[in-house]
Amino acid sequence: MGFRQRLTEIIEPAKTSSDVVSKVYDVLMLIAIFLGITPLMFKEQTPALVYIDQVSLFWFVLDYILRWITADIHTRYKGWKAFVIYPFTVNAILDILSILPSFINILNRALKLLRLTRLLKIVRLYRVVRYFEPLQIIVAVLRKEGSVLMAVMGLALFYIFATALIMFNVEFENELEGAEPMFNTIFDALYWAACTLTTVGYGDIYPVSTVGRFISMVSAIVGVAIIALPSGVITAGYMDELRLRREKKSNKENPTE
């Protein structure tokens, strides 16, 4: 096995439990990811937080370089084209966006680019998907069941719009005299419908008329059923994907003669 091939195996998530080096690299990258977002938990940037950010930056840059020099192995592109195209792939662009705030902070702390560049560090969380198998499974399920989930989302959006439209007009016609109007705009109605559908119920907007309250009850009951649909699809898909991955891992670790 060549050096770059082995390097690719190390920087990619460990395929088998026996690859200790790859597992250690995965753990170090997870630590770097969470260290990288630590400064976002504080308003003031102390020297200790700046040091933590720089340690995280080192690992991100190292990972980016290693992935670049092995692009012809772990991407679908081959030869010199892989090294030219890799910086423009989605993963590489997201990597650069996650690294950019730390570079800006090092080069010119006084500028800070409206301070909003700090939020780009949140992009680093997407890397967790690479090294955390449960999230990989969820992503795989979302891809496989995308059409079903989109249909459920369409149903939910239609239900939100329909109930919001009904409630907006019902409350407008049946507001109690002296009661403070709750649904002043259609956006208020959409906000209420979304909160009711998801059973959040903040309580800041609610119907005051008897008819409106009845519609709210029906909306809440139907909302529970609609919200349960994607939960069942994702749960079933997750168990199937988990079983398939376990079978593949078992076949790799115990190949048949």
Image (tube, rainbow, N blue to C red):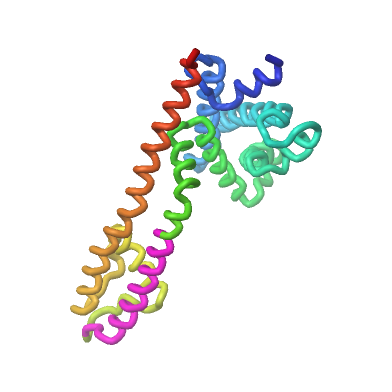
Q: Main secondary structure of the magenta part?
A: helix
In the rendered structure, the answer to whether residue 53 lies left or right of residue 199 reads right
- Outermost residue toward the right in this view: 80
Residue at left 50%, top 43%? 43
- Where, by quadrant of the figure, is residue 250 drawn? top left
Q: Is residue 120 above or below residue 34?
A: below
Give x and y (percent) for residue 232.
Answer: 32, 48
Residue at left 56%, top 43%? 123
In this view, the residue in front, 48 or 20, is 20
Residue 157 drawn in magenta: yes
Q: Is residue 109 visible?
A: no
Q: Is residue 118 above or below residue 77?
A: below
Q: Is residue 5 visible?
A: yes
Give x and y (percent) for residue 230.
Answer: 36, 52
In this view, the residue in front, 214 or 41, is 214
Residue at left 68%, top 37%? 103
| Count of marks, rendered view | 0
Give x and y (percent) for residue 208.
Answer: 23, 76
- Where, by quadrant of the figure, is residue 156 drawn? bottom left
In the rendered structure, the answer to whether residue 2 lies left or right of residue 11 reads right
Q: Is residue 89 above or below residue 10?
A: below
Residue at left 47%, top 55%? 147
- Outermost residue toward the front in this view: 257
Q: Is residue 238 above or below residue 173?
A: above
In the rendered structure, the answer to whether residue 240 lies left or right of residue 87 reads left
In this view, the residue in front, 169 or 71, is 71
Residue 77 drawn in magenta: no
The region drawn magenta spans 152-176
